[in-house]
Amino acid sequence: MNSPTSPMGLFSVINLLMLFLSGKANDVFLSFNHQEIGKNFADHLYKDLNYAGIRTFRDDGGIYTGQKSDIKRAIQESRISVVVFSKDYASSTKCLDQLVLIMDARRTTGLLVLPLFYNLDPSEVWEQKGLFEEAFAKHEKSFHKEMARVDSWRAALKEAADLKGKERKQDRYESKFIESIVKEIADKLNLSRPHVPPSSVPLSSALRPLSYFFGLLREWRRSFFRTPSLFLFFLTLLSSSVEGS
């Protein structure tokens, strides 16, 4: 057995701490057609998720070019992916590529996937009819030498549309729909914290729910290894403590 003062013993201690402190970089990866809903519904959803303490990653329309590996990493480092299927979702090859990565991560890393059907019947996605059918007719012409890629898009769409999701119909208030999404995601993340509007008077620690402190711990855990100086200081302190024991 390694003693706490041996190099392997020190490594074991550090490794255990890293396992405890490490976690997913994001709570949610948000996939949507930026040109269609990026400045309205998707933006409102993104802001409300973050306001609720749910750390959300989104592709703002420019980061994807030449950086597919970064998107793949962001997906793998998320706990849930919210896929917003809108009428023009399938017209975006970027969205379709993301969806393939998302469904791969669902199988390999246990990523949870929540499909949202925004002013769209789920059958249009699963059966790929209507605007989805038109989009794929164009894709098959543009990518006739990459039919395996087109087939992977079709398979990912069917797989995602077959999952339990949430449907927003045009006669439903958008704010209510977003509120229900935030609540469902918070429940999935075990973050059922009451929504408290900002106040100039801080809430007493004694009155704050336990989940509030869990949220603070999660944020500290995420940022710990992203701050090199803090991490090096911690290692130096731990090493000195072990050597002095």
Image (spheres, helix red, strand yellow):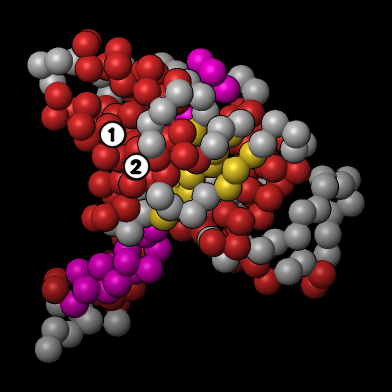
Please indicate whether residue 184 sits to the left or right of residue 103 in the image: right
Res. 107 in view: yes
The quadrant holding residue 190 is: bottom right
- The answer to whether 186 is drawn above or below residue 58 in the figure is below
Residue at 63% x, 48% y is 181
Residue at 27% x, 32% y is 153
Residue placed under numbered mark 2 in the picture: 158
Please indicate whether residue 81 sits to the left or right of residue 189 in the image: left
Residue 43 in the image, given as x and y percentages of width and height? 61, 28
The quadrant holding residue 20 is: bottom left
Q: Which quadrant of the figure contains the N terminus?
A: bottom left
Numbered circle sitting on residue 154? 1
| Label 2 – label 1 distance at C-alpha | 6 Å
Residue 132 in the image, given as x and y percentages of width and height? 40, 25
The stretch drawn in magenta includes residue 127: no
Residue at 31% x, 21% y is 136
Q: Residues within 10 Å of mark 1 (few under 14, many from 20)?
A: many
- The answer to whether 140 is drawn above or below residue 25 in the figure is above
Q: Kindly give the residue lying farthest to the bottom in the view shown.
A: 1
For label 2, the SS is helix
- Say which amino acid is labelled 2: Lys
Q: Nearer the viewer, residue 239 or 90?
A: 90
For label 1, the SS is helix
Residue 134 in the image, given as x and y percentages of width and height? 38, 17
Q: Which residues are magenta?
A: 9-38
Q: Which quadrant of the figure contains the C terminus?
A: bottom left
> Pointer 2 and pointer 1: residues touching (CB < 8 Å)?
yes
Residue 240 in the image, given as x and y percentages of width and height? 30, 68
Please indicate whether residue 161 sits to the left or right of residue 105 in the image: right
- The answer to whether 15 is drawn above or below residue 83 in the figure is below
